Amino acid sequence: MELTGRHKVNATPSTLWNMLMDTDTLSKIVPGISKLEKTGDNSYKSILEIKIGPVGGSFKGDLQMENIEEQKGFTLKVQQNSSVGNANAAIKIELIPVTIEETEVAFDGEVKVTGLLASMGQRILGSAANVITKQFFTNLDHELAKQQATS
Protein backbone atom coordinates (compact mmCIF):
# COMPACT_ATOMS: atom_id res chain seq x y z
CA MET A 1 0.00 0.00 0.00
CA GLU A 2 1.47 3.33 -1.11
CA LEU A 3 1.33 6.31 1.25
CA THR A 4 2.04 9.57 -0.55
CA GLY A 5 0.98 13.13 0.00
CA ARG A 6 1.92 16.79 -0.26
CA HIS A 7 0.48 19.69 1.69
CA LYS A 8 1.47 23.35 2.08
CA VAL A 9 1.30 24.92 5.53
CA ASN A 10 1.85 28.45 6.77
CA ALA A 11 4.91 27.72 8.87
CA THR A 12 8.67 27.68 8.49
CA PRO A 13 10.59 24.41 8.15
CA SER A 14 12.03 25.15 11.60
CA THR A 15 8.55 25.33 13.19
CA LEU A 16 7.44 22.11 11.50
CA TRP A 17 10.67 20.36 12.41
CA ASN A 18 10.22 21.21 16.09
CA MET A 19 6.65 19.90 15.99
CA LEU A 20 7.68 16.61 14.36
CA MET A 21 10.53 16.12 16.85
CA ASP A 22 8.23 16.65 19.87
CA THR A 23 6.78 13.34 21.11
CA ASP A 24 3.54 14.87 22.45
CA THR A 25 2.84 16.79 19.24
CA LEU A 26 3.81 13.87 17.02
CA SER A 27 1.37 11.60 18.84
CA LYS A 28 -1.43 14.09 18.09
CA ILE A 29 -0.53 14.39 14.40
CA VAL A 30 -0.07 10.75 13.38
CA PRO A 31 -3.53 9.16 12.94
CA GLY A 32 -4.43 6.35 15.31
CA ILE A 33 -1.64 6.77 17.87
CA SER A 34 -2.97 6.20 21.38
CA LYS A 35 0.49 5.95 23.00
CA LEU A 36 3.93 7.11 21.94
CA GLU A 37 6.85 6.63 24.30
CA LYS A 38 10.42 7.65 23.53
CA THR A 39 12.84 4.75 24.07
CA GLY A 40 16.02 6.22 22.57
CA ASP A 41 17.40 9.16 20.62
CA ASN A 42 15.24 8.51 17.57
CA SER A 43 13.18 5.50 18.58
CA TYR A 44 9.74 5.05 20.12
CA LYS A 45 7.35 2.37 21.36
CA SER A 46 3.85 2.95 20.06
CA ILE A 47 0.28 1.74 20.21
CA LEU A 48 -1.95 2.50 17.24
CA GLU A 49 -5.71 1.99 17.09
CA ILE A 50 -6.63 1.56 13.44
CA LYS A 51 -9.75 0.41 11.64
CA ILE A 52 -9.57 -0.47 7.96
CA GLY A 53 -12.93 -1.41 6.50
CA PRO A 54 -14.50 -4.02 8.77
CA VAL A 55 -11.17 -4.91 10.40
CA GLY A 56 -9.78 -2.98 13.32
CA GLY A 57 -7.28 -3.57 16.03
CA SER A 58 -4.66 -2.34 18.39
CA PHE A 59 -1.17 -2.42 16.93
CA LYS A 60 1.90 -2.42 19.16
CA GLY A 61 5.39 -1.87 17.91
CA ASP A 62 8.26 0.43 17.20
CA LEU A 63 8.85 3.66 15.30
CA GLN A 64 12.35 4.67 14.30
CA MET A 65 13.56 7.89 12.64
CA GLU A 66 16.49 7.43 10.26
CA ASN A 67 18.36 9.47 7.64
CA ILE A 68 17.67 12.60 9.68
CA GLU A 69 18.53 15.92 8.03
CA GLU A 70 17.82 18.77 10.46
CA GLN A 71 14.84 20.87 9.29
CA LYS A 72 14.77 19.04 5.92
CA GLY A 73 13.39 15.58 6.60
CA PHE A 74 13.81 12.01 7.76
CA THR A 75 12.68 8.47 7.07
CA LEU A 76 10.14 6.99 9.46
CA LYS A 77 10.40 3.21 9.84
CA VAL A 78 7.48 1.50 11.50
CA GLN A 79 6.96 -2.09 12.64
CA GLN A 80 3.54 -2.79 14.17
CA ASN A 81 1.97 -6.08 15.23
CA SER A 82 -1.60 -7.06 16.12
CA SER A 83 -3.94 -10.03 16.16
CA VAL A 84 -5.34 -8.98 12.75
CA GLY A 85 -1.98 -8.68 11.03
CA ASN A 86 1.31 -6.89 10.94
CA ALA A 87 2.36 -3.68 9.23
CA ASN A 88 5.84 -2.55 8.26
CA ALA A 89 6.49 0.80 6.64
CA ALA A 90 9.27 3.06 5.49
CA ILE A 91 8.07 6.59 4.79
CA LYS A 92 10.30 9.48 3.70
CA ILE A 93 9.12 12.83 5.07
CA GLU A 94 10.44 16.06 3.56
CA LEU A 95 10.03 19.71 4.55
CA ILE A 96 10.36 21.87 1.43
CA PRO A 97 10.52 25.67 1.83
CA VAL A 98 8.10 27.44 -0.52
CA THR A 99 8.30 31.02 0.78
CA ILE A 100 9.73 32.57 3.96
CA GLU A 101 6.61 31.57 5.94
CA GLU A 102 5.30 28.62 3.92
CA THR A 103 6.55 25.03 3.75
CA GLU A 104 5.41 22.01 1.81
CA VAL A 105 5.30 18.77 3.77
CA ALA A 106 5.75 15.80 1.46
CA PHE A 107 5.85 12.14 2.24
CA ASP A 108 6.28 9.03 0.18
CA GLY A 109 6.51 5.45 1.29
CA GLU A 110 5.15 1.99 1.28
CA VAL A 111 3.32 0.00 3.92
CA LYS A 112 3.45 -3.78 3.77
CA VAL A 113 0.67 -5.60 5.60
CA THR A 114 0.20 -9.28 6.41
CA GLY A 115 -2.51 -11.41 7.95
CA LEU A 116 -6.19 -10.48 7.84
CA LEU A 117 -5.28 -6.92 6.78
CA ALA A 118 -3.55 -8.19 3.64
CA SER A 119 -6.70 -10.06 2.60
CA MET A 120 -8.66 -6.78 2.45
CA GLY A 121 -7.70 -6.07 -1.15
CA GLN A 122 -5.94 -3.13 -2.75
CA ARG A 123 -9.10 -1.05 -3.24
CA ILE A 124 -9.91 -0.98 0.48
CA LEU A 125 -6.26 -0.54 1.50
CA GLY A 126 -5.85 2.29 -1.02
CA SER A 127 -8.95 4.01 0.30
CA ALA A 128 -7.66 3.61 3.88
CA ALA A 129 -4.30 5.12 2.84
CA ASN A 130 -6.11 8.18 1.44
CA VAL A 131 -8.10 8.62 4.66
CA ILE A 132 -4.94 8.29 6.80
CA THR A 133 -3.11 10.83 4.61
CA LYS A 134 -5.95 13.38 4.84
CA GLN A 135 -6.21 12.87 8.61
CA PHE A 136 -2.46 13.39 9.03
CA PHE A 137 -2.60 16.75 7.26
CA THR A 138 -5.80 17.80 9.08
CA ASN A 139 -4.14 16.97 12.41
CA LEU A 140 -0.98 18.84 11.38
CA ASP A 141 -2.99 21.96 10.45
CA HIS A 142 -4.91 21.76 13.74
CA GLU A 143 -1.78 21.44 15.91
CA LEU A 144 -0.06 24.23 13.97
CA ALA A 145 -3.06 26.54 14.49
CA LYS A 146 -3.04 25.76 18.23
CA GLN A 147 0.66 26.53 18.51
CA GLN A 148 0.35 29.75 16.52
CA ALA A 149 -2.59 30.89 18.68
CA THR A 150 -0.53 30.53 21.87
CA SER A 151 2.59 32.29 20.55
Image: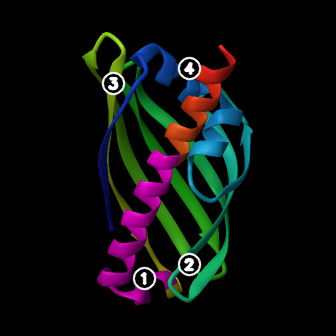
Quadrant housing the C terminus:
top right
Residue type at numbered disc 4: Asn
Residue type at numbered disc 1: Ala
Q: Look at the image and give the residue range highlighted in magenta.
A: 117-138
User: Which of the labelled discs sits on residue 118, or is there none?
Assistant: 1
Q: Residue furthest front?
A: 149
How many angstroms separate mark 3 from mark 2 (CA)? Answer: 36 Å
Verify CB contact (< 8 Å) between mark 2 and mark 1: yes
Q: Secondary structure at mark 2?
A: strand
How many angstroms separate mark 1 from mark 3 (CA)? Answer: 35 Å
Nearest-to-viewer mark from 1 and 4: 4
User: Which of the labelled discs sits on residue 103, or is there none?
Assistant: 3
Residue type at numbered disc 2: Gly
How many angstroms separate mark 4 from mark 2 (CA)? Answer: 33 Å
- Viewer-nearest residue: 145 or 127: 145
Q: Secondary structure at mark 3?
A: strand
How many angstroms separate mark 1 from mark 4 (CA)? Answer: 35 Å
Residue identified by numbered label 4: 18
Crowdedness of circle 4 by 10 Å Cα count: few (<14), some, many (20+)? some
How many angstroms separate mark 2 from mark 1 (CA)? Answer: 8 Å
Nearest-to-viewer mark from 1 and 3: 3
- Viewer-nearest residue: 140 or 62: 140
Nearest-to-viewer mark from 4 and 3: 3
